[in-house]
Image: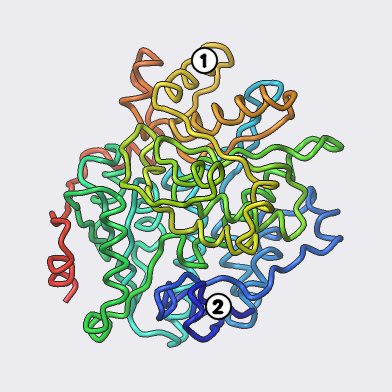
Protein backbone atom coordinates (compact mmCIF):
# COMPACT_ATOMS: atom_id res chain seq x y z
CA UNK A 1 0.00 0.00 0.00
CA UNK A 2 1.26 3.45 -0.96
CA UNK A 3 0.01 6.80 0.29
CA UNK A 4 -0.11 10.03 -1.70
CA UNK A 5 -0.34 13.63 -0.56
CA UNK A 6 -3.67 15.34 -1.07
CA UNK A 7 -1.69 18.34 -2.32
CA UNK A 8 -0.09 16.13 -4.99
CA UNK A 9 3.33 17.78 -4.75
CA UNK A 10 5.18 14.96 -2.93
CA UNK A 11 6.06 11.40 -3.99
CA UNK A 12 4.00 8.43 -2.72
CA UNK A 13 5.32 6.68 0.39
CA UNK A 14 4.71 3.46 2.31
CA UNK A 15 2.94 3.12 5.67
CA UNK A 16 6.15 3.43 7.68
CA UNK A 17 7.12 6.74 6.08
CA UNK A 18 3.58 8.12 6.29
CA UNK A 19 3.45 7.23 10.00
CA UNK A 20 6.88 8.53 10.92
CA UNK A 21 6.53 11.83 9.03
CA UNK A 22 2.86 12.49 9.81
CA UNK A 23 2.34 14.90 6.93
CA UNK A 24 3.77 14.95 3.44
CA UNK A 25 6.65 17.37 2.71
CA UNK A 26 4.23 19.58 0.74
CA UNK A 27 2.05 19.95 3.84
CA UNK A 28 -0.72 17.68 2.57
CA UNK A 29 -2.40 14.79 4.36
CA UNK A 30 -1.59 11.28 3.21
CA UNK A 31 -4.33 9.17 1.63
CA UNK A 32 -4.21 5.51 0.56
CA UNK A 33 -3.75 4.94 -3.17
CA UNK A 34 -6.40 2.22 -3.13
CA UNK A 35 -9.34 1.44 -0.82
CA UNK A 36 -9.10 -2.27 0.04
CA UNK A 37 -12.32 -4.28 -0.05
CA UNK A 38 -13.23 -6.52 2.88
CA UNK A 39 -13.32 -10.15 1.67
CA UNK A 40 -16.78 -11.75 1.60
CA UNK A 41 -15.59 -14.35 4.10
CA UNK A 42 -14.53 -11.65 6.55
CA UNK A 43 -17.97 -10.04 6.45
CA UNK A 44 -19.76 -13.38 6.77
CA UNK A 45 -17.66 -14.42 9.76
CA UNK A 46 -17.44 -10.96 11.39
CA UNK A 47 -19.73 -11.72 14.34
CA UNK A 48 -17.62 -14.69 15.45
CA UNK A 49 -14.20 -13.05 15.17
CA UNK A 50 -12.22 -11.70 18.12
CA UNK A 51 -11.57 -7.97 18.26
CA UNK A 52 -7.86 -8.60 17.69
CA UNK A 53 -8.58 -10.69 14.58
CA UNK A 54 -10.90 -8.02 13.21
CA UNK A 55 -8.25 -5.36 13.81
CA UNK A 56 -5.53 -7.41 12.12
CA UNK A 57 -7.66 -8.11 9.04
CA UNK A 58 -8.69 -4.48 8.65
CA UNK A 59 -5.22 -2.99 9.17
CA UNK A 60 -3.07 -5.51 7.29
CA UNK A 61 -3.69 -4.07 3.78
CA UNK A 62 -2.85 -0.57 4.97
CA UNK A 63 0.37 -1.58 6.74
CA UNK A 64 1.62 -3.83 3.95
CA UNK A 65 5.09 -5.26 4.44
CA UNK A 66 6.33 -2.46 6.71
CA UNK A 67 5.53 -4.47 9.89
CA UNK A 68 6.07 -8.21 10.25
CA UNK A 69 2.81 -10.15 10.46
CA UNK A 70 3.39 -11.47 13.99
CA UNK A 71 4.26 -7.99 15.24
CA UNK A 72 1.20 -6.48 13.59
CA UNK A 73 -0.98 -9.11 15.27
CA UNK A 74 0.51 -8.12 18.64
CA UNK A 75 0.08 -4.39 17.96
CA UNK A 76 -3.55 -4.87 16.94
CA UNK A 77 -4.33 -7.05 19.96
CA UNK A 78 -2.86 -4.46 22.35
CA UNK A 79 -4.65 -1.57 20.64
CA UNK A 80 -8.14 -3.07 21.18
CA UNK A 81 -7.62 -4.77 24.53
CA UNK A 82 -10.83 -3.46 26.16
CA UNK A 83 -14.57 -3.55 25.53
CA UNK A 84 -16.66 -1.70 22.93
CA UNK A 85 -20.25 -2.53 23.95
CA UNK A 86 -23.23 -1.54 21.83
CA UNK A 87 -25.79 -0.50 24.47
CA UNK A 88 -29.52 0.00 23.75
CA UNK A 89 -30.62 3.48 24.83
CA UNK A 90 -34.13 3.49 23.34
CA UNK A 91 -35.95 1.17 20.95
CA UNK A 92 -34.53 3.14 18.02
CA UNK A 93 -31.12 4.25 19.33
CA UNK A 94 -28.08 2.32 20.53
CA UNK A 95 -24.80 3.76 21.81
CA UNK A 96 -21.46 2.26 20.82
CA UNK A 97 -19.43 2.99 23.95
CA UNK A 98 -15.87 3.88 22.99
CA UNK A 99 -14.76 5.10 26.42
CA UNK A 100 -13.65 1.90 28.12
CA UNK A 101 -9.96 2.35 27.33
CA UNK A 102 -7.24 3.75 29.62
CA UNK A 103 -8.12 7.44 29.10
CA UNK A 104 -11.91 6.96 28.77
CA UNK A 105 -12.01 8.28 25.19
CA UNK A 106 -12.39 6.80 21.72
CA UNK A 107 -8.95 8.05 20.73
CA UNK A 108 -7.26 5.38 22.86
CA UNK A 109 -7.34 2.86 19.99
CA UNK A 110 -5.60 5.08 17.45
CA UNK A 111 -3.07 6.37 20.00
CA UNK A 112 -2.18 2.86 21.17
CA UNK A 113 -1.91 1.56 17.61
CA UNK A 114 0.27 4.44 16.47
CA UNK A 115 2.54 4.39 19.54
CA UNK A 116 3.25 0.71 19.06
CA UNK A 117 3.94 1.19 15.35
CA UNK A 118 6.42 3.98 16.09
CA UNK A 119 7.98 1.90 18.85
CA UNK A 120 8.38 -0.99 16.39
CA UNK A 121 10.06 1.22 13.80
CA UNK A 122 12.32 2.79 16.46
CA UNK A 123 13.44 -0.59 17.84
CA UNK A 124 14.36 -1.75 14.34
CA UNK A 125 16.43 1.36 13.79
CA UNK A 126 14.08 2.43 10.98
CA UNK A 127 13.72 5.93 12.37
CA UNK A 128 15.78 8.41 14.43
CA UNK A 129 14.50 9.65 17.81
CA UNK A 130 11.10 11.20 17.17
CA UNK A 131 9.23 14.12 18.70
CA UNK A 132 5.47 13.64 18.51
CA UNK A 133 4.01 17.15 18.28
CA UNK A 134 0.25 17.24 18.67
CA UNK A 135 -2.57 19.72 19.24
CA UNK A 136 -5.58 18.65 21.28
CA UNK A 137 -9.08 19.98 21.84
CA UNK A 138 -9.54 17.60 24.76
CA UNK A 139 -9.29 13.84 24.38
CA UNK A 140 -6.51 13.41 21.81
CA UNK A 141 -3.86 14.70 24.19
CA UNK A 142 -4.73 12.34 27.01
CA UNK A 143 -4.90 9.34 24.70
CA UNK A 144 -1.57 10.23 23.10
CA UNK A 145 0.07 10.85 26.47
CA UNK A 146 -1.11 7.47 27.77
CA UNK A 147 -0.31 5.62 24.56
CA UNK A 148 3.23 6.96 24.22
CA UNK A 149 4.19 7.11 27.91
CA UNK A 150 7.61 5.54 28.31
CA UNK A 151 8.01 4.54 24.63
CA UNK A 152 11.79 4.53 23.96
CA UNK A 153 13.03 6.97 21.37
CA UNK A 154 9.84 9.07 21.40
CA UNK A 155 9.28 12.45 23.08
CA UNK A 156 5.73 13.84 23.15
CA UNK A 157 4.86 17.56 23.14
CA UNK A 158 1.14 18.35 23.45
CA UNK A 159 -0.39 21.79 22.82
CA UNK A 160 -3.77 22.42 24.44
CA UNK A 161 -5.94 25.56 24.78
CA UNK A 162 -5.80 27.01 28.31
CA UNK A 163 -9.13 26.87 30.10
CA UNK A 164 -10.87 25.04 27.26
CA UNK A 165 -10.42 21.40 28.29
CA UNK A 166 -12.19 19.69 31.19
CA UNK A 167 -10.42 19.13 34.53
CA UNK A 168 -10.05 15.38 33.94
CA UNK A 169 -8.74 15.96 30.42
CA UNK A 170 -6.19 18.44 31.78
CA UNK A 171 -5.06 15.98 34.45
CA UNK A 172 -4.50 13.35 31.78
CA UNK A 173 -2.37 15.82 29.80
CA UNK A 174 -0.29 17.37 32.52
CA UNK A 175 0.44 14.84 35.27
CA UNK A 176 2.27 11.94 33.62
CA UNK A 177 5.78 13.37 33.25
CA UNK A 178 8.56 11.17 31.81
CA UNK A 179 8.60 11.74 28.03
CA UNK A 180 5.35 13.76 27.99
CA UNK A 181 5.32 17.61 28.00
CA UNK A 182 2.16 19.75 27.92
CA UNK A 183 2.21 23.28 26.49
CA UNK A 184 -0.73 25.37 27.74
CA UNK A 185 -1.59 27.79 24.93
CA UNK A 186 -3.40 31.06 25.58
CA UNK A 187 -5.79 30.53 22.66
CA UNK A 188 -8.14 28.08 20.95
CA UNK A 189 -7.65 24.59 19.56
CA UNK A 190 -7.41 26.08 16.07
CA UNK A 191 -4.54 28.26 17.33
CA UNK A 192 -2.81 25.15 18.69
CA UNK A 193 -3.34 23.30 15.43
CA UNK A 194 -2.03 26.22 13.37
CA UNK A 195 1.15 26.36 15.49
CA UNK A 196 1.70 22.63 15.01
CA UNK A 197 1.20 22.86 11.25
CA UNK A 198 3.68 25.74 11.05
CA UNK A 199 6.26 23.72 12.97
CA UNK A 200 5.99 20.85 10.50
CA UNK A 201 6.81 23.22 7.64
CA UNK A 202 9.84 24.79 9.38
CA UNK A 203 12.99 23.52 7.64
CA UNK A 204 15.32 24.95 10.31
CA UNK A 205 13.42 23.15 13.05
CA UNK A 206 13.46 19.93 11.02
CA UNK A 207 17.26 19.90 11.24
CA UNK A 208 17.03 19.93 15.04
CA UNK A 209 14.07 17.60 15.69
CA UNK A 210 12.44 14.78 13.75
CA UNK A 211 8.77 15.72 14.09
CA UNK A 212 5.65 13.66 13.57
CA UNK A 213 2.04 14.18 14.55
CA UNK A 214 -0.33 11.99 16.55
CA UNK A 215 -3.48 13.85 15.55
CA UNK A 216 -5.82 12.02 13.22
CA UNK A 217 -3.94 13.66 10.35
CA UNK A 218 -1.48 10.77 10.90
CA UNK A 219 -2.59 7.64 9.04
CA UNK A 220 -1.65 5.40 11.99
CA UNK A 221 -4.06 7.38 14.21
CA UNK A 222 -6.78 7.79 11.61
CA UNK A 223 -7.10 4.38 9.96
CA UNK A 224 -7.66 2.22 13.10
CA UNK A 225 -10.84 4.16 13.80
CA UNK A 226 -12.51 1.97 11.17
CA UNK A 227 -12.51 -0.76 13.81
CA UNK A 228 -15.27 0.92 15.84
CA UNK A 229 -17.72 0.40 13.02
CA UNK A 230 -16.73 -3.24 12.63
CA UNK A 231 -17.26 -3.78 16.35
CA UNK A 232 -20.67 -2.10 16.08
CA UNK A 233 -21.75 -4.42 13.26
CA UNK A 234 -20.60 -7.46 15.23
CA UNK A 235 -23.33 -6.52 17.73
CA UNK A 236 -26.03 -5.09 15.43
CA UNK A 237 -29.19 -7.25 15.37
CA UNK A 238 -29.08 -10.07 12.81
CA UNK A 239 -31.28 -9.31 9.81
CA UNK A 240 -31.91 -5.69 10.82
CA UNK A 241 -31.63 -2.89 8.29
CA UNK A 242 -28.28 -1.14 8.11
CA UNK A 243 -28.03 1.44 10.90
CA UNK A 244 -28.00 5.18 10.50
CA UNK A 245 -24.72 6.21 12.15
CA UNK A 246 -24.47 9.52 14.00
CA UNK A 247 -20.88 10.58 14.71
CA UNK A 248 -19.92 13.49 16.99
CA UNK A 249 -17.65 15.41 14.64
CA UNK A 250 -14.87 17.92 15.28
CA UNK A 251 -11.75 17.24 13.23
CA UNK A 252 -13.70 14.61 11.22
CA UNK A 253 -11.18 11.77 11.45
CA UNK A 254 -13.64 9.39 13.11
CA UNK A 255 -16.41 10.08 10.62
CA UNK A 256 -13.99 9.76 7.71
CA UNK A 257 -12.83 6.38 9.02
CA UNK A 258 -16.44 5.19 9.17
CA UNK A 259 -17.05 6.26 5.58
CA UNK A 260 -13.84 4.46 4.60
CA UNK A 261 -15.04 1.24 6.27
CA UNK A 262 -18.32 1.60 4.41
CA UNK A 263 -16.43 2.05 1.12
CA UNK A 264 -14.55 -1.17 1.94
CA UNK A 265 -17.86 -3.03 2.14
CA UNK A 266 -19.09 -2.75 5.73
CA UNK A 267 -22.93 -2.64 5.52
CA UNK A 268 -23.58 0.67 7.21
CA UNK A 269 -26.44 3.04 6.43
CA UNK A 270 -26.45 6.80 6.14
CA UNK A 271 -23.96 8.80 8.18
CA UNK A 272 -24.75 11.94 10.14
CA UNK A 273 -22.05 14.46 10.96
CA UNK A 274 -23.29 15.65 14.36
CA UNK A 275 -21.70 19.04 15.00
CA UNK A 276 -21.92 21.65 17.73
CA UNK A 277 -21.84 25.38 17.04
CA UNK A 278 -18.71 24.83 14.93
CA UNK A 279 -20.49 24.14 11.66
CA UNK A 280 -18.38 24.68 8.50
CA UNK A 281 -19.27 21.18 7.26
CA UNK A 282 -23.06 21.47 7.76
CA UNK A 283 -22.89 24.82 5.96
CA UNK A 284 -20.87 23.23 3.13
CA UNK A 285 -23.41 20.45 2.65
CA UNK A 286 -26.20 23.03 2.48
CA UNK A 287 -24.47 25.61 0.28
CA UNK A 288 -21.53 23.96 -1.46
CA UNK A 289 -19.16 26.54 0.05
CA UNK A 290 -16.59 25.54 2.66
CA UNK A 291 -15.46 28.43 4.86
CA UNK A 292 -13.14 27.83 7.84
CA UNK A 293 -14.16 29.83 10.89
CA UNK A 294 -12.66 30.64 14.28
CA UNK A 295 -13.49 27.90 16.77
CA UNK A 296 -16.42 28.57 19.10
CA UNK A 297 -16.17 27.13 22.66
CA UNK A 298 -18.98 24.74 23.60
CA UNK A 299 -19.80 22.08 26.20
CA UNK A 300 -18.64 19.41 23.71
CA UNK A 301 -15.13 20.83 23.69
CA UNK A 302 -13.36 18.06 21.75
CA UNK A 303 -15.48 19.08 18.76
CA UNK A 304 -14.60 22.78 18.94
CA UNK A 305 -12.86 22.87 15.57
CA UNK A 306 -13.50 25.60 13.03
CA UNK A 307 -11.29 24.20 10.27
CA UNK A 308 -11.44 20.38 10.41
CA UNK A 309 -8.28 18.87 8.93
CA UNK A 310 -9.77 15.54 7.88
CA UNK A 311 -12.60 16.95 5.82
CA UNK A 312 -10.29 17.02 2.80
CA UNK A 313 -9.99 13.23 3.15
CA UNK A 314 -13.77 12.90 3.06
CA UNK A 315 -13.87 15.02 -0.09
CA UNK A 316 -11.16 12.82 -1.62
CA UNK A 317 -13.10 9.66 -0.74
CA UNK A 318 -16.02 11.05 -2.77
CA UNK A 319 -13.84 12.44 -5.59
CA UNK A 320 -14.79 15.97 -4.50
CA UNK A 321 -18.30 15.29 -5.82
CA UNK A 322 -20.78 17.16 -3.62
CA UNK A 323 -23.76 15.26 -5.04
CA UNK A 324 -22.23 11.90 -4.11
CA UNK A 325 -21.29 13.18 -0.66
CA UNK A 326 -24.81 14.46 0.01
CA UNK A 327 -26.16 11.02 -0.94
CA UNK A 328 -24.10 9.38 1.82
CA UNK A 329 -23.85 12.05 4.51
CA UNK A 330 -26.15 14.39 6.37
CA UNK A 331 -25.01 17.01 8.85
CA UNK A 332 -26.69 18.74 11.74
CA UNK A 333 -25.84 21.47 14.23
CA UNK A 334 -26.74 21.03 17.91
CA UNK A 335 -26.64 23.91 20.39
CA UNK A 336 -25.40 23.70 23.98
CA UNK A 337 -29.00 24.08 25.18
CA UNK A 338 -30.06 21.14 23.02
CA UNK A 339 -27.06 19.16 24.27
CA UNK A 340 -28.05 19.64 27.92
CA UNK A 341 -31.69 18.88 27.12
CA UNK A 342 -30.68 15.59 25.45
CA UNK A 343 -28.55 14.55 28.44
CA UNK A 344 -31.39 15.36 30.84
CA UNK A 345 -34.10 13.65 28.77
CA UNK A 346 -32.13 10.45 28.21
CA UNK A 347 -31.09 10.26 31.87
CA UNK A 348 -34.57 10.86 33.26
CA UNK A 349 -36.48 8.78 30.72
CA UNK A 350 -34.06 6.03 29.72
CA UNK A 351 -31.67 5.85 32.70
CA UNK A 352 -28.65 6.28 30.42
CA UNK A 353 -26.02 8.98 30.98
CA UNK A 354 -24.63 10.69 27.89
CA UNK A 355 -21.56 12.89 27.78
CA UNK A 356 -21.91 16.18 25.83
CA UNK A 357 -20.40 14.71 22.65
CA UNK A 358 -22.65 11.67 22.69
CA UNK A 359 -25.57 13.99 23.41
CA UNK A 360 -24.83 15.98 20.25
CA UNK A 361 -24.84 12.73 18.28
CA UNK A 362 -28.08 11.64 19.98
CA UNK A 363 -29.89 14.91 19.29
CA UNK A 364 -28.82 14.86 15.64
CA UNK A 365 -29.90 11.24 15.20
CA UNK A 366 -33.31 11.79 16.82
CA UNK A 367 -33.94 14.80 14.59
CA UNK A 368 -33.02 12.73 11.53
CA UNK A 369 -35.26 9.86 12.67
CA UNK A 370 -38.20 12.23 13.17
CA UNK A 371 -37.82 13.35 9.58
CA UNK A 372 -37.21 9.89 8.07
CA UNK A 373 -39.67 7.48 9.62
CA UNK A 374 -37.68 6.49 12.70
CA UNK A 375 -34.96 4.43 10.98
CA UNK A 376 -32.96 2.58 13.65
CA UNK A 377 -29.52 3.97 14.29
CA UNK A 378 -26.55 4.17 16.56
CA UNK A 379 -24.49 6.94 18.05
CA UNK A 380 -20.80 6.86 18.89
CA UNK A 381 -20.38 7.61 22.60
CA UNK A 382 -16.85 8.92 22.39
CA UNK A 383 -16.02 9.97 25.97
CA UNK A 384 -16.96 9.07 29.52
CA UNK A 385 -19.37 11.53 31.21
CA UNK A 386 -16.94 11.89 34.16
CA UNK A 387 -14.85 14.21 32.00
CA UNK A 388 -17.61 16.81 31.99
CA UNK A 389 -18.75 17.37 35.59
CA UNK A 390 -19.84 20.98 35.04
CA UNK A 391 -22.41 19.81 32.49
CA UNK A 392 -23.39 16.39 33.80
CA UNK A 393 -23.49 16.76 37.59
CA UNK A 394 -26.22 19.45 37.73
CA UNK A 395 -28.43 17.03 35.78
CA UNK A 396 -27.58 14.14 38.09
CA UNK A 397 -27.98 16.27 41.21
CA UNK A 398 -24.85 14.70 42.67
CA UNK A 399 -21.17 14.13 42.00
CA UNK A 400 -20.48 11.54 39.34
CA UNK A 401 -18.64 8.45 40.54
CA UNK A 402 -14.99 8.50 39.50
CA UNK A 403 -13.69 5.48 37.57
CA UNK A 404 -10.47 3.95 38.91
CA UNK A 405 -8.33 5.45 36.13
CA UNK A 406 -9.53 8.93 37.11
CA UNK A 407 -9.08 8.32 40.83
CA UNK A 408 -5.44 7.50 40.11
CA UNK A 409 -4.94 11.03 38.74
CA UNK A 410 -6.23 12.79 41.85
CA UNK A 411 -3.58 14.65 43.81
CA UNK A 412 -0.96 14.47 41.07
CA UNK A 413 0.97 17.65 40.37
CA UNK A 414 0.09 19.57 37.23
CA UNK A 415 3.10 20.34 35.04
CA UNK A 416 2.58 22.53 32.01
CA UNK A 417 4.51 25.19 30.11
CA UNK A 418 2.54 28.40 29.34
CA UNK A 419 2.74 29.48 25.71
CA UNK A 420 1.38 32.49 23.82
CA UNK A 421 -0.19 32.11 20.40
CA UNK A 422 3.19 32.90 18.90
CA UNK A 423 5.10 30.52 16.66
CA UNK A 424 8.50 31.92 17.58
CA UNK A 425 7.85 30.99 21.24
CA UNK A 426 6.98 27.42 20.22
CA UNK A 427 10.00 27.20 17.95
CA UNK A 428 12.31 28.52 20.67
CA UNK A 429 11.01 25.86 23.05
CA UNK A 430 11.47 23.06 20.53
CA UNK A 431 14.92 24.26 19.51
- Residue 96: quarter of image: top right
Q: Which quadrant of the figure contains the N terminus?
A: bottom right
Q: At which x and y percent is residue 265?
A: 77, 57
Residue at x 27%, y 71% (from the top left corner) = 199
Q: Nearer the viewer, mark 1 or mark 2?
A: 2
Residue 223: image location, x then y, percent: 57, 62
**How far apart in space, not on screen, are marks 1 and 2 (Cα)?**
46 Å
Image side of residue 193 versus residue 217, left or right: left
* Residue neighbourhood size for the residue with mark 2, other residues' Cα within 10 Å, grouped as few (<14), some (14–19), many (≥20): many
Tell me the element at label 2. strand
Q: Which residue is mark 1?
A: 345
Q: Is residue 196 above or below residue 303?
A: below
* Lower sequence index among marks 1 and 2: 2
In the foreground, 307 or 301: 307
Residue 4 is tagged as 2
In this image, 327 relative to 170: left or right? right
Residue 200 higher or lower than 287, as above or below? below
- Nearer to me, 160 or 204: 204
- The residue lying toward the viewer, choosing from 342 and 238, is 342
Quadrant occupied by the C terminus: bottom left
Q: Report the side of 375 relative to 122 (left or right).
A: right
Does residue 195 sit above or below 267 in this rendering?
below
Instruction: For residue 325, say whether it is visible.
Output: yes
Q: Residue 49's image quarter?
A: bottom right
Amino acid sequence: MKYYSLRHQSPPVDFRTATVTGQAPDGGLYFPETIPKFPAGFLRELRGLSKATVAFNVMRPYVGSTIAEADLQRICAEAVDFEFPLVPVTAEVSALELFHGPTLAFKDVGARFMSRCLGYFAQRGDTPPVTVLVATSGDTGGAVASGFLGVPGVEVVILYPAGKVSPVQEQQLTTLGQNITALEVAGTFDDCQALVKQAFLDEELAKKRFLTSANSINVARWLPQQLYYCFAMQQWPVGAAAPVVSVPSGNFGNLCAGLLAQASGLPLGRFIAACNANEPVPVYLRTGTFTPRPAVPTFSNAMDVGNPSNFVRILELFDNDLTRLRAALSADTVTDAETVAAIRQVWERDDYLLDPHGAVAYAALRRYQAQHGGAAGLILATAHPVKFPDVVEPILGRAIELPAVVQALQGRTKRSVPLAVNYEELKAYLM
